[in-house]
Amino acid sequence: MLQFPANIAAAAGVNFAAIMPEVILSVIAMALLLVNVFIKSEQKAYLGYLSLAGIILTFVTVISGWGTAQSGFNNSVLQDNFALFFKGTFLVSAFLTILITDQYLKREECNWGEIYPLILFATVGMMLMASGTDLMTIFLGLEVLSVSLYVLAGFNRANLKSNEAGLKYFLLGAFSTGFLLYGMALTYGATGTTRVAAIASYISQNGMVLSNPMLLAGMLLMAVGFSFKIAAAPFHMWTPDVYEGAPTPMTAFMSVGPKAAGFAAFLRVFIVAFPAMKADWSELLWVLAVLTMTVGNITALYQTNIKRMLAYSSIAHAGYVLVGFTAGNAVGTAGVLFYMLSYAFMNIGAFAIIVLVGRKGEDNNNVSDYAGFGFKHPVLGMCMSIFLFSLAGIPPAAGFIGKFYLFSGAIQAGYVWLAIIGVLNSAASVYYYLRVMVFMYMKDPTEEFDWLQVSPSLALCLLLSVAGVLIPGILPGSLLDLAQKALLM
């Protein structure tokens, strides 16, 4: 008899409205798994269309929740503007990825319908990471994301490089997850709670815990785990091989969505749970940012394979975002949100061109294979140039505005040298981006590119990506306003 009030209280704390986007996307993904069993192989493209419809429905749910925070499951999840902004970024990444997936699958003759539910399940994991306010919820989201990505990286079973990518990502991912979970365990041991806000409250009420080596070790180990997910140096070693070997659409997806999810969880845990230790983690992030930018850009200079070049570029961009994170102020954090959404458009757009230029077996991925591409296909060459200019941070693209706010936040916080190093790294990156354009426009064509066919879905991806790069670059006010309304502080 005495159990009933407790059960009623537990039920009252559920509040499915706090995870409604995740519920909708999960139901659609499970429905797609069932549909996949009953349709023929030549009809698998319909699963992609259904996935796109599901993402649009989920996106509408995300938009409708803006400005109204929802807490559920005894405050272990919080759907606030911060979570909703990142959920929108994840959905955009998944939408653009699915648009470029069908043409690739048909070319590689691996048109298995399971890929679409896996993308949706990975997106669900990302959304849980963004809205999790309990370390266990964040870990649950991370595992849902990671297991899906392990399969997606090795999805092209006939390709040995794809098999290698899936195995490497699985082994190193499992290893890094151990660091993250051990850090969470030590933090729980030091504070007695896994709730992010409760950790901050315990530290503020018990100042002596700041001298507890268990708490510091827990924070450092969690930083290592998150650094692996965002591909920050020196925890980036998996990135080039996995990005090169994975199917190109999945490389595009992994370089954007999981990176944004890692930053979402990283930001919430460190800004909300450890504000009293900001002096400690700011120094750590300062070093990580410099190391990540420098290693990514210097190594990218020597790459001849365009997928590996963009892999090291992705590492460098994680360093730029860490600059805004290190600043820890409103300008820097808003820059992080703005940049992650802009990066989704510019990076997936570039990979869409790589899908087009590529041949069966992932051939034609060297930079030299793009010789004369800009003359043979002027519109596609212009699109690729726009994406590369944005990645390099050249105005009027969104990449320039994003870097401006990231570095401005660092300067306002007093990290002037960090901003200077960031600018110098961004300038160095121009070389390897322009090298692709030199081949596209200043080298004689070695191919006729007669195999190249632009499907309607891929054309839509390019159109959306170009708009997502140029509109925020020319008129950044609206997106920056949304980013500022989504701050945790």
Image (cartoon, rainbow, N blue to C red):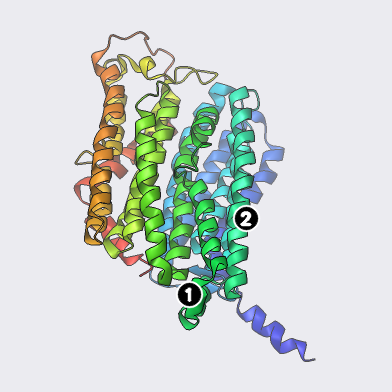
Q: Residue at x 50, y 45 (%)?
A: 52
Labelled disc at residue 136: none
Query: For the C terminus, which image quadrant?
Result: bottom left
- Residue 289: image x %, image y %? 37, 48
Find the residue positioned furthest to the right.
Answer: 1
As shown in the figure, which amino acid type bears the numbered disc 2? Val
Residue 293 is at least partly visible in this image: yes
Q: Residue at x 20, y 51 (%)?
A: 475
Labelled disc at residue 27: 2
In the rendered structure, which disc, 1 or 2, sits on the residue that comes first in sequence?
Answer: 2
The secondary structure type at the circle numbered 1 is helix
Q: Is residue 250 left or right of residue 328?
A: right
Residue 156 is at least partly visible in this image: no
- Residue 280: image x %, image y %? 41, 63
As shown in the figure, which amino acid type bears the numbered disc 1? Ala
- Residue 358: image x %, image y %? 46, 21
Q: Is residue 163 left or right of residue 369?
A: right
Labelled disc at residue 200: 1
Judging depth in this view, the residue of 112 and 423 nearest the camera is 423
Query: For the N terminus, which image quadrant?
Result: bottom right
Total tally of numbered discs in the picture: 2
